[in-house]
Amino acid sequence: MSRPESGDDRDDDRDLGHDDGGGYVVDTRNRLGRGRARSRPLPPLAPQARPAPRPARSPESRPAPGRDQAYAPQRDPREDRPTGPPPPGHTRRRRRRRTILVAVLLVVLLWLAFLVWVPFNAWGNVKRVDNVPSGARPADNGGHNYLLVGSDGRDGLTQEQRDQLNAGGGDIGSRTDSIILVHVPSAGGKSALVSIPRDSYVPIPGHGTNKINAAFSIGGAKLLTQTVEQVTGIHLDGYLEIGFGGFANVVNSLGGVEVCVPFDMKDPEAAIDLKKGCQTLDGATALGYVRARKSDPRGDIGRAERQRQFLGAVLKKAATPSTVLIPWRYKSLADATASGLTVGQTTQLADAARILQALRGVDGGDTLSLVVPIETAALQTSNAGVAVKWNSTQAKALFSALQNDEPLSVPPAGTTGQ
């Protein structure tokens, strides 16, 4: 006999999850206040078919967002950044890097200031001489032309230094051992160093015809400048002279200079005894090397060539990092150069820089190393003994090219000294 279901039983069935669809839902809620145990087992849930997956929509087929469509709020990426002060270790590292960077920049600035200050300071200590001729002068047609003179000046040398340099005899500061015309073009082409043999037989203004060296002995830098301008037709923009002591000091400040001696050279008057081959010369030996004439088969012509060669080697070493990047050596070189240097009253530091750059270019082929074309080195004269006579035609062609600042790429005819 069936018992009619009470209201409680109906409530229990509803609590057990009977649904109208024929399935069962398990009620997991905690039933507080009910002490009646369930002895009747629950029927299993009927299996339900899984819905088929919906096809993916392309972005074009998605409906445009409407007013009633809900969207998740967009999150600002900046909200994920950590807030508050950085960790102490991170702050210390940043400060350390900043301190190192500032220190490096300060060192670089100080070093650049030192590199600029040294030559300006040395330039302020050079001796000055009035070399500008009076009266008419050749026209300045372009380019930069300078007179570079190596004199046997002994000013400031002690007797011991004179003996060491073999420079004790003769009239102090009355002769030139080298006369070089330096041409720096402004219209392109290579710079040129043109040696003028000191025994060149030329007219000297107000003193007849004589060896060009006599112009320096008679009237110093001014008469020598006037003589060179008149015989070449070239306007000289500056004058630079270096004496015995200055030359030797420059070489010693560099720790010696390497040069390749072309042949064995033994010259008691120059105090040298050198073997053929490349070797490093100190100041005294280098001075003898560039002064020696009797031990050279080509005499004054060979000496002029060695002078240009050695000056190029000096400037090449002076520009190396081992000189420029070592403060005391860099300053020592500048001071040694200034101590033995004499410049014209109108010669500026920029002029000296152009001369040095031209000398430096000899070793690398950027500067032409020339000599005035020679007709004979054994000209018999009535007043000056044996002298050097120029080849007038070739000499005029060379000086005309320099005067007009014509670009030069190869040595003009007759200028190699061969």
Image (cartoon, grey):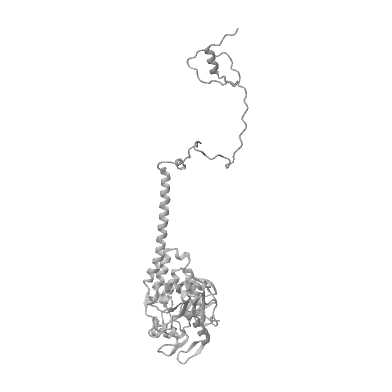
Nearer to me, 285 or 209: 209
Query: Which residue is outermost to the front?
Result: 67
Q: Quadrant of the N terminus?
A: top right
Q: Quadrant of residue 220?
A: bottom left
Q: Quadrant of the C terminus?
A: bottom right
Q: How many marks?
A: 0
Q: Is residue 62 left or right of residue 325?
A: right
Q: Residue at x 41, y 88 (%)?
A: 205
Residue 8 at what x, y percent from top left?
Answer: 52, 13
Nearer to me, 55 or 219: 55
Residue 307 at what x, y percent from top left?
Answer: 49, 77
Residue 415 at what x, y percent from top left?
Answer: 53, 81
Residue 40 higher or lower than 88, as above or below? above
Nearer to me, 120 or 380: 120
Residue 275 at what x, y percent from top left?
Answer: 53, 75
Q: Is residue 2 left or right of residue 222?
A: right
Residue 272 appears anywhere in the view = no
